[in-house]
Image (cartoon, coloured by chain):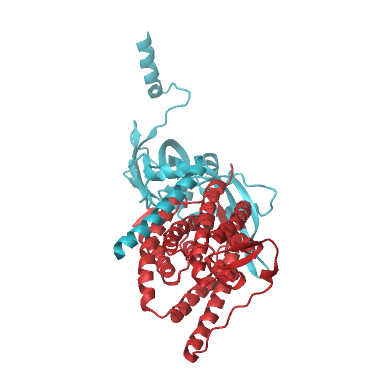
């Protein structure tokens, strides 16, 4: 009995009997790495996202299939400050707290993003940066809040933390696709989500998500954790290190001079 | 070689850091200054967040002061009782400074405070040094003797104490006050404060020049050590890896500087140092005065969810 049940469950999607009908075109994904270690010599990392479209039927006629790849880092609160001139110098005067902004966001597509997806689908799946930023939870008591959110996007785009990579997904024979996303050195630790969307006529046909772990490793991890979790011991260790280095330097200099 | 700093969370060139530590080490070897007042702004310029630069600068000074004070202890040019009185004032000043620093860090004004302090103190010290060394140059040409120092109001205050090594019998309040101000500056600017303390000890307290450097180094070790631990616990801004690279560069540089100092003319070097200090001051002042290209800035460190 049990065996039969398993078999039926396995076949259900193929028969189209499950809750949602299986899409005619599905994403099969590969990643160059599913873990990114931040070591002492970390200078950024390029991840290669590649995959194929699996179909049971021949390639349908009509407008071509398009691919969108997004990579998003963990959400974190940010304070955006604005400088104004006061007493002749530029000082931070006003600020807006943004509750949950992705620390990293890249969106790559075949063609332009506008060709690949409609407004409503973009809104539903939160694909483009403006749609992602809509829900970041900027404080609404400040009428200038949108300006601060724009500044956040602008600054992060300059630091390569937010990337719009149009025309950057290669797509061969409507089947094989690949793209590279550069993760800059200034990365926040955490779980990064990679999402792939297949679209046709600007509608999402299939969606796939997988995760990448970005972690400090080795000495970096140990120091960072000690600094946060045991700040007193960390401070004393820093002190001891400086004392030993200072004493050692003095001793070495004396030995060297004779 | 790029190196990723775990607390500053930026990737910088390790050789650049070694070079900066070395340069500051050369200066400290040549002039007997700690060099924190140059190192911390240099760290700002290469993109280290100011709170991290200040706290890590303090840690680096611990190392350079220890290697300096050992030589002075051997020569018996440290006035320990005076050092302890200065230290008492310094610890209170540092504790107040770290509180102010942490509070302003939360409201986003710490960069401004640090930059303003640097502009004011570097400007004043650079200008004084420049004028002083120019007139010293003129004096050495004319050959007239230097002026004698005067004893003023400082010597009429109560609670007097004997400082044998310095040959002084003065009130404890002036050294306590000097120590307090230096401690405050150490916490806010990430400097040892020697550039304030040394002139204050000579001109205000009337201490003999030969014990001034050793005694100030003695006080600086403990004050900057205290500041390091306070910053580490209050705002987690001490980057050990950054400190270590700077220390290595500084240690080598200091030896080079000591060797160079023997061969060069002090007055001309002082003018160069003064110009360097004024240059850094001008750069920081312009950053405050000129409208920045980007008016907005982001803060993620220490933002509670």
Residue B50: x, y in percent? 53, 58
Answer left or right for A91 relative to A193. right
Is residue A122 or residue B235 the one in the foreground?
B235
Answer left or right for A52 relative to A184. left
In the image, residue A178 sits, relative to residue B267, either above or below, namely: above
Judging from the image, what is the letter of the chain drawn in cyan?
A: A
Is residue A109 or residue B76 the one in the foreground?
B76
In the image, residue A205 sits, relative to residue B131, either above or below, namely: above
- Identity of the residue furthest to the bottom in this view: B142
Residue B197: x, y in percent? 56, 66
Is residue B272 or residue B197 the one in the foreground?
B197
**Figure disc tally:** 0
Answer left or right for A110 relative to B44. left
Residue at the image position 59 percent from the left and 69 percent from the top: B200
Residue B99: x, y in percent? 62, 52
Looking at the figure, which quarter contains the C terminus of chain A? Answer: bottom left
Judging from the image, what is the letter of the chain drawn in red?
A: B
Residue A186 in sight:
no
Residue B195: x, y in percent? 53, 68
Residue at the image position 37 percent from the left and 75 percent from the top: B262
In the image, residue B136 sits, relative to residue A200, either above or below, namely: below
Looking at the figure, which quarter contains the N terminus of chain A? Answer: top left
Residue at the image position 56 percent from the left and 70 percent from the top: B207
Residue B116 in sight:
yes
């Amino acid at each position: 009995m049990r065996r039969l049940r398993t078999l039926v469950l396995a076949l259900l999607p193929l028969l189209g009997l499950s809750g949602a009908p299986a899409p005619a075109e599905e994403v099969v994904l590969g990643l160059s790495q599913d873990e990114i270690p931040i070591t002492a010599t970390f200078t950024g990392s390029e991840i290669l996202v590649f995959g194929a479209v699996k179909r049971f039927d021949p390639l349908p006629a009509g407008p071509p299939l398009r691919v969108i790849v997004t990579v998003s880092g963990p959400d974190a609160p940010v304070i955006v400050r604005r400088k104004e001139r006061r007493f002749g110098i530029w000082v931070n005067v006003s600020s807006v707290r943004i509750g949950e902004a992705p620390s990293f966001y890249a969106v790559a597509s075949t063609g332009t993003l506008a060709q690949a997806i409609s407004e409503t689908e973009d809104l539903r799946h939160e694909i483009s940066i403006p749609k992602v930023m809509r829900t970041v939870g900027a404080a609404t008591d400040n009428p200038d809040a949108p300006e601060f959110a724009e500044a956040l996007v602008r600054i992060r785009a300059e630091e390569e933390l937010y990337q719009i990579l149009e025309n950057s997904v290669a797509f061969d024979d409507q089947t094989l696709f690949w793209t590279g996303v550069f993760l800059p050195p200034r990365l926040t630790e955490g779980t990064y989500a990679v999402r792939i969307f297949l679209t046709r006529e600007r509608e999402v046909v299939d969606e796939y998500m997988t995760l990448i772990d970005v972690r400090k490793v080795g000495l970096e991890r140990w120091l960072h954790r000690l600094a946060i979790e045991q700040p007193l011991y960390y401070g004393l260790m820093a002190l001891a290190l400086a004392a030993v280095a200072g004493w050692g330097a003095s001793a070495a200099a004396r030995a060297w001079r004779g | 070689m790029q190196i990723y700093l775990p607390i500053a969370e930026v990737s910088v060139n390790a050789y650049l850091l070694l070079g900066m530590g070395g340069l500051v080490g050369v200066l400290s070897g040549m002039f007997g200054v700690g060099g924190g007042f140059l190192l911390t702004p240099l760290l700002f310029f290469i993109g280290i967040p100011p709170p991290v630069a200040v706290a890590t600068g303090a840690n680096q000074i611990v190392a350079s002061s220890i290697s300096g004070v050992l030589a002075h202890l051997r020569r018996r040019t440290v006035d320990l009782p005076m050092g302890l009185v200065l230290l008492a004032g310094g610890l209170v000043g540092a504790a107040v400074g770290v509180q102010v620093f942490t509070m302003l860090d939360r409201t986003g004004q710490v960069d401004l405070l640090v930059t303003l302090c640097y502009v004011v103190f570097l400007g004043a010290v650079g200008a004084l040094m420049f004028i002083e060394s120019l007139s010293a140059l003129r004096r050495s040409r004319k050959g007239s003797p230097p002026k004698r120092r005067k004893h003023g109001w400082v010597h009429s205050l109560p609670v007097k104490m004997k400082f044998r090594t310095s040959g002084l019998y003065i009130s404890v309040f002036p050294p306590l006050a000097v120590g307090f101000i230096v401690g405050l500056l150490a916490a806010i600017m990430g400097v040892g404060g020697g550039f304030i303390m040394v002139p204050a000890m000579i001109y205000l307290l009337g201490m003999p020049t030969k014990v001034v450097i050793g005694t100030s180094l003695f006080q600086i070790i403990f004050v900057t050590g205290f500041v390091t631990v306070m910053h580490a616990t209050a705002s987690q801004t001490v980057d050990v890896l950054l400190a270590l690279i700077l220390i290595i560069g500084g240690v080598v540089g200091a030896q080079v500087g000591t060797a160079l100092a023997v061969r060069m003319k002090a007055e001309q070097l002082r003018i160069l140092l003064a110009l360097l200090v004024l240059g850094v001051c001008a750069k920081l002042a312009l950053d405050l005065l000129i409208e920045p290209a980007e008016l907005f800035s982001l803060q993620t460190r220490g933002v509670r969810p």
